Amino acid sequence: MKPTADRLPLEQGLFGRLRRDAGTAWEGYVRHPFVLALGAGTLARPAFQHYLKQDYLFLIQFARAYALAGYKSATLRELRAASASVAAIVDVEMPLHVSYCAEWGLSEADMAAEPEALETVAYTRFVLERGHAGDRLDLEAALVPCIVGYAEVAERLIADPATGRVGNPYAAWIDAYAGADYRAVALAAIENLDRLGATRGAEARYPDLLATFTAATRLEAAFWDMGWAVRAGT
């Protein structure tokens, strides 16, 4: 997948406000040492393999979260969007992930048998809890840091002169999240959050939405911490 020259509107709308007000938590997520090591091509192979296995388990729970989003939908448009997201994860992203992981010596059977790390459990169950306890907007506020954050991570790495392009074993991973296809997914998530915010009283609920967004952002950084700890042997 070729990276795109277009840039995401990261500072606009409800997402932009949440991203800004999350402060250092957001920067700690998108500029995590794990991410920078991916860009430099210096991340230890076992650390990346551990991340890939946990990401497989993570995707299963994210598909469940979008299934919950369907239940929480108030309109047919929202229901169709949630249904499309479930199908995209289960029928497109998961097979691609399994195929990519095979290149790193990981079979689907191995990944399915892998115990969920505490960081994986904490993050995914937090997202599901926000969906159960709140409405579709609460759930999207918990989901959007992952969707858009990965696009921003890749966008930053592509623009960073320190990112290695030749001989970098992680170049394909960076290109996938910097590509036009994934950028379209991230842009749709930004626009969807704005639509939901406009119809579900985001202004009056902003402090709670920010708390959810910031917690999800911190949990994303903890997911990187998990892989970084493997690199360090801790």
Image (spheres, rainbow, N blue to C red):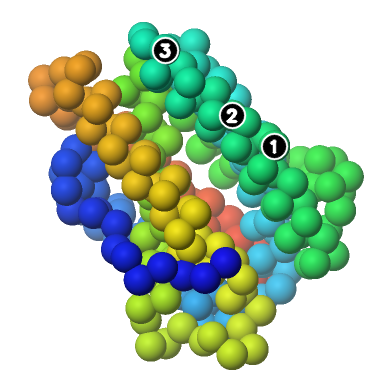
Front one among 215 and 185? 185
Q: Regarding mark 1 in the picture, which secondary structure is present there?
A: helix
Whichever of labels 1 and 3 marks the residue nearer the N terminus, that label is 3
Q: Disc 2 marks which residue?
A: 86
The answer to whether any part of residue 61 appears in the image is no
Is 171 located above or below residue 29 in the figure? Answer: below
The numbered dot on residue 76 is 3
**Image quadrant assignment for residue 90:** top right
Q: In the image, 39: left or right of 192?
A: right
Pick the quarter of the image with the C terminus: bottom right
The image shows residue 208 at horizontal and vertical percentages of 23, 26
Spatial CA span between label 2 and label 3 = 15 Å
Amino acid identity at mark 1: Asp
Dot 3 crowding, Cα within 10 Å, few <14, some 14–19, many 20+: few
The image shows residue 117 at horizontal and vertical percentages of 66, 44
Residue drawn 88% across and 45% down? 109
Residues at marks 2 and 3 touching, judged by CB atoms closer than 8 Å? no
Dot 2 crowding, Cα within 10 Å, few <14, some 14–19, many 20+: many
Residues at marks 2 and 1 touching, judged by CB atoms closer than 8 Å? no
Amino acid identity at mark 3: Leu
Front one among 232 and 168? 168
Q: Which residue is the extreme one toward the left?
A: 204
